[in-house]
Image (tube, rainbow, N blue to C red):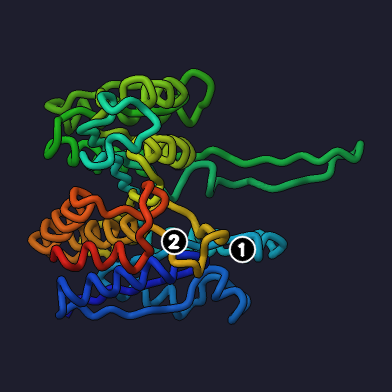
Amino acid sequence: MATLLLLPGDGIGPEVCAEVRRVAAALVPSLVVEEAIYGGASYDAHGTPLTDEVRDRALASDAVLMGAVGGPKWADAPRHLRPEAGLLNLRKAMNVYANLRPAYCFEALAGASSLKTELVSGLDIMFVRELVGGVYFGEPRGIETLPDGQKKGFDTALYTTSEIERAGRVAFELARGRKNKVHSAEKSNVMESGLLWKQVITDLHAREYPDVELEHILADNCAMQLVRAPKQFDVIVTDNLFGDILSDAAAMLTGSLGMLPSAAIGDPNKPGLYEPIHGSAPDIAGKGLANPLAAILSFEMALRWSLKEIEAADRLLAAVKGALDSGSRTRDLGGELTTVQMGDAVLCRI
């Protein structure tokens, strides 16, 4: 039997993961759902955001789904022990190098976007963000004191050919099943790592994917185009830093950060890591106000990409759409439903 490891984490994480557990039980009763402590909660209990035992359980599972980590409570913890460090370490340990972040707009929510309805109606973008390299992991990094007493902070944006190629392959393969177009976003005009990114993607395209349309775009122009004419994009492949920024910007085109899931995948037959894009939102934690749909849709991606339950994934996506079409809304979408009530709205359509 397949195993899903839930890592609820901090803030609203436990609330939204509880709805995933209910949906999983109704949709795929044979799925074994386990749970482990993680993030700030793990730091409080064990002095580390990710224990070796939880890391090993993640590697042994078929899929991992987390809620959210972090919050001001742990702001003074050593950087390498903050909840966010646990997330980075888990991604690295699982070697989930390709982060899939869909930005699609459910028709019922087109009016909730900050952009005009005609710009976002029918929006369907897939970001492929390289996830375990780049400036978030490059060495050297640190903060030093200079002879004159000033501080100097530095990070290294570093990529190798193979790291870029494997993210590129995921993007091109995805595009073949969609509209057959890839935008590759970087800053090749000012960054050496960006120039290498452009060169490697160009070479990979020519060798293996000449049938897919490829367009290079500078990351800052990509940001502008996302709010000018977002439907021009199909698949966007980019590095760790720009992927983080651009996909969050695109998230707001869909109406709410509480709507968007993500998948982090690596080599075939290895577990994927699934998580809602939203943060831990400690200001509303425990109040039943969180939108669980991003977590539920992250489970839909886990069903599709890791658990190979395509029919169940299709049923779940249809159930979410049906709930939204019926007017079900949490407060972030302009409604009054609680977290549990939104889960109920999905469950009654499964």
Looking at the image, can residue 203 be seen? no
The N terminus - image quarter:
bottom left
Residue 67 location (% of width, % of height): 41, 64
Q: Quadrant of residue 31?
A: bottom left
Amino acid type of the residue tagged 2 in the rendering: Leu
Residue receiving disc 1: 82
Residue receiving disc 2: 289
Q: Quadrant of residue 174?
A: top left
Depth check, front residue: 306 or 52 = 306
**For the residue labelled by badge 1, is the local secondary structure a helix, a strand or a loop?**
loop
Q: Are marks 1 and 2 in contact (CB under 8 Å)?
A: no
Amino acid type of the residue tagged 1 in the rendering: Arg
Depth check, front residue: 18 or 331 = 331
Viewer-side label of 1, 2: 2
Number of disc labels:
2
Q: Residues within 10 Å of mark 1 (few under 14, many from 20)?
A: many
> Which residue is at the far right?
148
Q: Residue at x 26, y 64 (%)?
A: 270
* Relative height, residue 209 to residue 57 (above, below): above
Q: Quadrant of residue 32?
A: bottom left
Q: Residue at x 30, y 47 (%)?
A: 100
Q: How far is the residue under mark 1 from the one under mark 2?
A: 25 Å
Chain-order first, disc 1 or disc 2: 1
* Relative height, residue 54 to residue 214 (above, below): below
Horizontally, is 21 left or right of 291 in the view?
A: left
* Relative height, residue 42 to residue 114 (above, below): below
Horizontally, is 37 left or right of 316 in the view?
A: right
> Which residue is at the far front?
336
* Relative height, residue 1 to residue 316 (above, below): below
**For the residue labelled by badge 2, is the local secondary structure a helix, a strand or a loop?**
loop
Residue 17 location (% of width, % of height): 36, 69
Q: Residue at x 18, y 40 (%)?
A: 173
